Amino acid sequence: FLHSRTAFEAGLAVTFYAVFLYAYLRYRQGETAWIYAAVSAAALTFYSYSPAQMVMAVLSLFLFISDWRYHWQQRRRLLLALGLAALLGLPYLRFRIEHPGETLRHLTLLNSYWLSDRTPLQKLGIYFGEYLHGLSPLYWFVPQSGELIRHVMKGYGHLGWVSLPLILIGLVRTLRHVRRSEYRLILLAALAAPSGAALVQLGITRALFMVIPAALLG
């Protein structure tokens, strides 16, 4: 409710994330031409918000592994989609060539732990700690004190607590039907959602992608 009424880029990225999930589901249900819409929505998500880059990379990997047999059956269509993805990736490639140090500068501005003197193992430990925190019901349904005040509604969790029983029922149903691609898609979208936020520090704007699979589960 709050972030849909702001001009923060996180809301735009989450919108495109929802479009991607819809288009991919149509593709996976046999309407193979929807893969081009899915690729386009993935690119728009990727470009809208920096944490979305990690989210889309992780989710794309998950979906490639999850549905590889179906992708192989649609390999001709998928090759064309990969060509579209490469075309849409050219602006990012150009940006990386012209500004090779921009990612490092961005992480420096955010004071990311990846640039600290900690060992690689310690950094991975922090990453997975932040990631698991982003999957915790306590983070989503209990009011948080560590968030910036402009990103919270006083006395409310990030998700309404009345939806928790429905989401839990949806989660059980999803796990029971996990062999079906449409259920796996919801589960994988939820698992990918906090992956970008965990690169720096968990925050609602960086983890806002979770609201889409949470709504589908509910």
Image: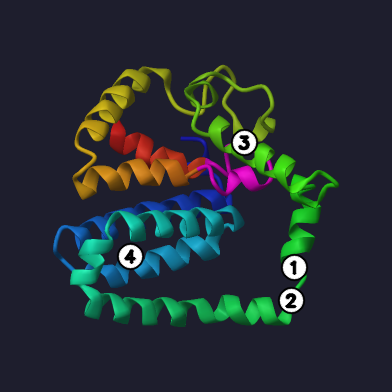
Q: Which residue is mark 2?
A: 99
Q: Which residue is mark 1?
A: 102
What residue range appears in magenta? 194-207
Q: Amino acid type of disc 3?
A: Glu
Q: How many marks?
A: 4
Q: Amino acid type of disc 4?
A: Ala
Asked whether the residues under the numbered discs 3 and 1 touch, taking CB atoms below 8 Å apart as contact, a structural biologist would say no
Q: Foreground residue, 150 or 106? A: 106
- Label 3 vs label 1: CA separation? 24 Å
Q: Does label 4 or label 3 sit earlier along the sequence?
A: 4
- Can you tell which mark lies on residue 38? 4
- Colouring used for the render: rainbow
Residue 86 quadrant: bottom left
- The spot of residue 152 in percent (x, y) is 59, 29
Q: Amino acid type of disc 1?
A: Glu
- Label 4 vs label 1: CA separation? 28 Å
